Amino acid sequence: MNLKPAEDRLRKTLVVGLGSIHGDDSIGWVITDRLAKRLDVARIGCGPSHDRTQAREESASIPGQQWVLGQLASPAELLDRLDPAECPDRFTDLIVIDACVGSGKVGEVLRWDWPDRDWETRRTSGTHDLSLALALELAERLGRLPQRLTILGVLIPHPREEPAAVQWPAPPTGIAAAAPAARTAVPFSGLSTALAAAVPDILSRIEPICREGIG
Amino acid sequence: MSEHQGQTRSIRVEAMTRVEGEGGLDIRLLDGRIEQVNLNIFEPPRFFEAFLRGRPLEDVPDITARICGICPVAYQMSSVHALEAALGVEISPEIRRLRRLLYCGEWIESHALHVHMLNLPDFLGFDGALEMAQAHPERVERGLQIRKLGNQLLDRLGGRAIHPINVAVGGFYRAPTRGELSEFVKPFEAGLRLAEEATREIATLDFPVFDQAYDLVALVHPDEYPMNEGRIESCDGLSIAADEFPNHFVEQQVPHSTAMQAIRLETGKPYLLGPLARIQLAFERLAPEARRLADEVRFQPPCRNPFYGILARSLELVHAFAEAIDILKTYTPPRPPRIAYAYREAVGGAATEAPRGLLYHGYGIAADGKVTHANIVPPTSQNQGQIEADLRDYLPQVLSLPDREVADACEKLVRCYDPCISCSTHFLRVRIDRG
């Protein structure tokens, strides 16, 4: 795998947060939201995957570099996002940010650079939904993967150890409040105390990875 | 995987692959005779019916959607129809068509995934979609493309593809504009051609010979291919209103499964739901495109071979695209998008056709609009008994094979029903004891 993109061409990085608006599972979305400000991306894609206007806002702040930030709910959506029909102007880099549980300090950022043999063992036995490892392997076999792929796992408290406890948004007054028209602004306020406190540190570790190769 | 204990030969598949959820299969043979075939579902019970008690009825479509990430629309549709039946809500024809369009999106997404990614590798000799992608990337690409179209439609109509949030008792929280839907026509016409291509290809597969005497059950509507409404009918002459379901079908607990199993009260036997049942009972109501293609590939009901489920499912894909295109081209936004209603103490039941088969919901509502009781009977728990019966009948064909191949053959058969264990726990490990 060629880890260094050709210097004479535009570098186009897709940074994807996987998760949801719920609790610590939202960390991938929280980080992409904050990265948008740091990378000077005006707005990030959080809407329907077919909605290119929402999903394709890019930064032009650094010559030769563009970022596209996306917030996706499932690895299968990532497979769709990498469909050449969706994005004829291919990405050179892909960075996936997701919550993970394991031993280590809350907020610790784990990094895997594709291909990683560890990931081959992370394929689940298979259900209707695709695991991240299976989606990425499938993308690779179908020729959809960019030149460089980095997976960043942010350690969150084990759900059984610390319940998400701080600053939950007010519950909607009716289901209508969650209707599509109200979904453009995503509330990120359900992180647990320990993870919320670690966000600045997580950002300071992830931002340089997003900027890697830019000189 | 294999244990030999005295006169007993034991084969075990610890966890079924390419099925949704967690379950296993235990087969015990004593002196060469099949003594026991158990679908052993160990995914924990999920207690959705209990969650619903005491909640506002408006919460029901969103909570029940959470039962399944593949067929949330089915849960939403059965729930809103049951609640509307209780409340006496009459929806407008425009709302009804928009609901059918939403259901088409789900059938497309679910059927595309099962046909291409979960079931087709079995017929082509691959371990899974990943291995198939190496040799036949075009087939995997086609499946992904079709599935994506279904998801995009769900996104547009439901606010998001997984667990949509726009379905309401009485209609929709927001109806899309004509422009928002008209842009789907061309991609869906391309999707129809892909589905037709897939069906022609699938019709040429080698299907094992295995005919069963099924009691096929599905919704039947006088004018439409079954989806949102109709009478519950069977191939032996049963014809009942959907809300009479509990009087004719009963769920039973079995020791080896956290999922209930259903039988017909009249016969005391299991029955089969899903594409084979729907095509058998409603062939004439398939869209002309799907009927013509069925004729072209010489698929003519009755078909009682579960391995042909993939072909029936492909024809339903064609149907779903054709119907969706028709609705997209003639769409008029419903005004209002949601019919108002008043609370009343009542009970109501309804059934719709989930991709895997008939899904019944029944609810009781108090005068303040809170749910007093809920009864949800998913298709996979209804099909489980029939799957066990089919395995019992299929095993003699494969028992002479080595244990591993027996287990593989059983898994392949089970996948033909597109079981959704997560839905039914409310499923595969295969273990065989041989005598």
Image (cartoon, coloured by chain):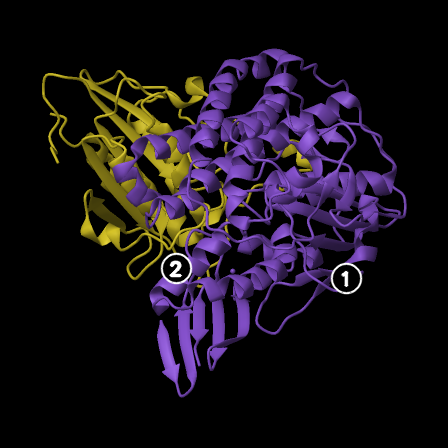
B44 vs A3: above or below: below
Task: Work out whether disc 1 and disc 2 sit on a shared chain.
Answer: yes
In the picture of the structure, the residue carrying the numbered disc 2 is B408
B426 vs B220: above or below: below
> Residue type at mark 1?
Thr
Work out whether residue A126 or residue B180 is closer to the camera in this orientation and state it: A126
Which comes sooner in the sequence, label 1 or label 2?
1
Q: Quadrant of residue B421?
A: bottom right
Provide the secondary structure element on which disc 1 rests. loop
Left or right: A4 with respect to A142?
left
Q: Position of residue B323 (x, y in %)?
A: 63, 23
- Label 2 CA crowd tier, 10 Å (few <14, some 14–19, many 20+): some
- Label 1 CA crowd tier, 10 Å (few <14, some 14–19, many 20+): few
Q: Note the chain letter of the yellow one.
A: A
Q: Position of residue B366 (x, y in %)?
A: 86, 50
Work out whether residue B195 or residue B358 is closer to the camera in this orientation and state it: B195
Residue B110 visible in the shown view: no
Q: Which mark is residue B267?
A: 1
Marks 1 and 2, how far apart in space? 32 Å
Q: In which quarter of the image is residue A10?
A: top left
Work out whether residue B163 or residue B356 is closer to the camera in this orientation and state it: B356
Q: Which mark is residue A32?
A: none
* Chain of the residue on which disc 1 is drawn: B
User: What shade does chain B have?
Assistant: purple
At x 61%, y 27%, the residue is: B291
Q: Where is residue B393 in the image (x, y as percent from the top left)?
A: 55, 63
B57 vs A65: above or below: below
> Residue type at mark 2?
Asp
Quarter placement of the N terminus of chain A: top left
Q: Quadrant of residue B382?
A: bottom right
